[in-house]
Amino acid sequence: MDSPIINGVKKLDENYIYGRWGAYQVFQSAIAFYNILPTGFQLLIGVFIGYRPTYQCSSSSAYENQTYTNNSYFVTYNKCHIKVFYNDTTRDAPELVKDDLCTEGYQYSLDKYSTFVTEMDLVCDQAYLGELVQTLIMAGQLVGAAIASSLSDKWGRKTVHLTSHLLTLAFGIGVAFSPNYITLAILKFIIGVLQQGMVMSDAVLTLELFPEKTRFYAEAIGLFCWTTSLVIMAPIGYLMRDYSWRYLQIVLTGFSLFSLIQYWVQDESLRWLVANGKKEAADKVIHKVARWNKINYDDLKMIVDKRMASTEQNTQKADKNGTTTENTPQEKLAVEKYSIVTILKHRRILITSLIMWFTCLGRRTITIVFHAVCGISLASATLLNHFSGTDSSAKMASIITTFAGKSAITGSFSTLFLYTPELYPTNLRNAGIGFSSAFSRLGAIISPFAGTLAEEIPWAPGTIFSAMCLTVTLIILYVPETRGVELPQTLVEVKVWYTEKSGLRQQQKVESTKL
């Protein structure tokens, strides 16, 4: 972020709570970006440790006796059944005389202890238990996104993230020592909760470090770190392919060892400290920022004090309008207390939240373009596939348009953690993004049934998804644009902003000005 230069020294930006970008923010954001890696590992490690290789019934001594080894009989060992056939030369085909289950276990193409699926024999009638593990992680994410995000607004981003990270280290190692399936399933659910505790708090903590003009870098670099975690997993998994899945679980969980020193190297968000009247803690951060960035402490303190005064003034206005505030000693600021109930009580914020929960989407203009491209692409793919018949060129066109839609929706989703928290005040920011994330987990839980629906009505999934994307291009107009707007501190600021900058209202003002 560029600041004016006076007498050879950059003047601090009064609209940026940290004054100007410097070494302090680089170090703190590096910590936040590193902490993305363990969240990716814990979410997607199941690709490796829950893999189901090819398998068949193990040989059974009961079928190796003389009765079944003469020329008239032969035994086949299939995936889930052992079948005995009688080879009667008078018949056109062998006669099935016995069909039995795998009485002596299974034989896998990998080592018995390569994955928890092979170790616990989660195949055949137990196969659903393997998929259930990942479903439990997603269910845990839903719970974590809803609960941890609100706690992050109440107790602080650092507190929730550090607690979640330490517990992830403990429970992640616990998974490696799971003695049975029930223990494994419970621990995976808990890790899903903790993973969202880390993701939600880390996303907002990172966003609040950046100045307005470069906030998009937080999302771009964060997405890069997320994909990096996926790339790192592949070679680690390959190098450990001959070891038990438990060792891979320990190695990837080891990336969370950083949590043991995280308390001493990572600071709380200065924005959150100011919004919650934590003067002493904020002063410690101000001293550290001034020292690292080589700026004058008094100048930075003046910026923070102005922000605190503004927060107190807006809080008093909110108190007059009936918003609940905390009674504090005179030397402390009156702090506006928010919760998910706050979202439900205020119509404009609720409508904006409902829109965000429905789409999980990015900044408005880009979101409209991406969703329009996705909707049109999916509609085209559905039509091409439905009427293609034996035309190979039409089928190829259907595949191409499907990939175009996938690219578009990925582009929109990648900006989720940028746009959503920008729409909420500091003490409601994590709750806003958390419940949006929770709703997206509902979509993740429901989406596997799209394949089942396609088996009955091939054109239905594409039509539904296309209609939803096109709907977003209309309802998103209600949400204000956040580009060029400083992160709001209080509910009063947000309500004024929504009133003046709501998409449709702003468009009407622009048109009336032109006239």
Image: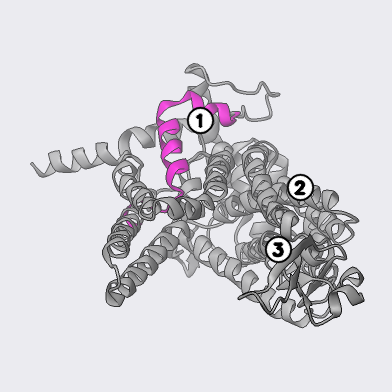
Foreground mark, 3 or 2, reads 3
Q: Which residue is mark 2?
A: 190
Q: Is residue 393 magenta?
A: no
Foreground mark, 1 or 3, reads 3
State the image coordinates of residue 315 (x, y, percent, origin top left): 53, 27
Kind of residue sitting beneath label 1:
Ile
Residue 473 visible, this angle: yes
Is residue 349 or residue 208 the one in the foreground? Answer: 349
Q: Relative to 507, is 391 above or below?
A: below
Q: Which residues are magenta?
A: 337-366
- Which quarter of the picture shows residue 28? bottom right
State the image coordinates of residue 126 (x, y, percent, origin top left): 75, 55
Is residue 463 or residue 17 the one in the foreground? Answer: 463
Residue at position x 69%, y 48% in the image:
136
Is residue 43 or residue 321 the one in the foreground? Answer: 43
Is residue 173 or residue 200 the one in the foreground? Answer: 173
Cα distance, mark 1 to mark 3? 35 Å
Cα distance, mark 1 to mark 2? 27 Å
